[in-house]
Image (cartoon, helix red, strand yellow):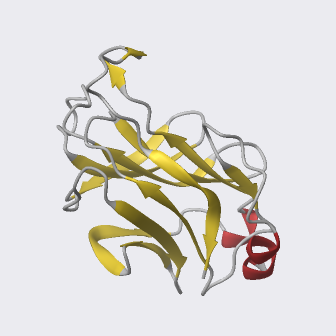
Amino acid sequence: MVLQLVLLSLFAFAESFPERDLPGLVVGDKIGFTAIYSSTANRFGLNIEDADGNYIFRLAFRNPSDKSKSPPPPVLVLSTYEGKWVSPFSATFPDMTDGQEISVLIEAQDEKFVGYLNGEVMEGVEMKYRYPLETAAKLRLWGGAAEDGDRRPAPEHRAPVHFAPGIMPQ
């Protein structure tokens, strides 16, 4: 069902934070995005949200320029959010180079989400379901801005992550 929705709607996303409504997820669904990677963007990622805006799955790519200290970047952070962050944990940051086109997919497997980068499983990017798959209502991409410190515009040598205009069907 998600595959059909995504195939029919590879257009009309907000330029800065693309999002797509989801009619729930089922085991076997794969959703994600393509982007042009930049190591000078602080952080970027995706949320799978329920109808109330709670994150039933969040994947955050925290670049070396990210000022977070816990855990220190570069790192991937997986978590859920329901009024507060719930049991976040980290995974190894994958090898990527500036200007590289990347594809990120999240697959709904039997009991967990699993993340892929360019068709390969990302080490440590799997999380058991904490909420029913059918409660998935939205996929939202976020971040990727070239910022300097506390969300101030970055100097010219900093580049943003550029999301491609579409959420990838699989």
Q: Is residue 25 left or right of residue 95?
A: right
Position of the N terminus by quadrant:
bottom right
Which residue: 29% across, 52% down?
A: 76
> Is residue 102 shown left or right of residue 2?
left
Q: Is 90 in front, or is 102?
A: 102
Question: Would residue 88 be found to the left or right of residue 162 on screen?
Answer: left
Classify 153 as above or below 39.
Answer: above
Residue toward you, 86 or 157:
157
Q: Residue at x 26, y 26 (%)?
A: 157
Kindly identify the residue that appears in the image at 38 percent across and 63 percent down: 102
Residue 2: % across, % down: 75, 76
Image quadrant assignment for residue 5: bottom right
Residue at point 48% right, 76% down? 112
**Relative vertical location of residue 88 with respect to residue 33 in this rendering, above or below:** above
Q: Taking the image as drawn, is residue 45 in sight?
A: no
**x, y (%) of residue 141?**
57, 48
Question: Residue 163: where, in percent of width, then height?
Answer: 52, 50
Residue 72 visible in image: yes
Q: Which quarter of the rendering shows the C terminus?
A: bottom right
Quadrant of the rendered image containing residue 69: top left
* Number of numbered discs overlaid on the protein picture: 0
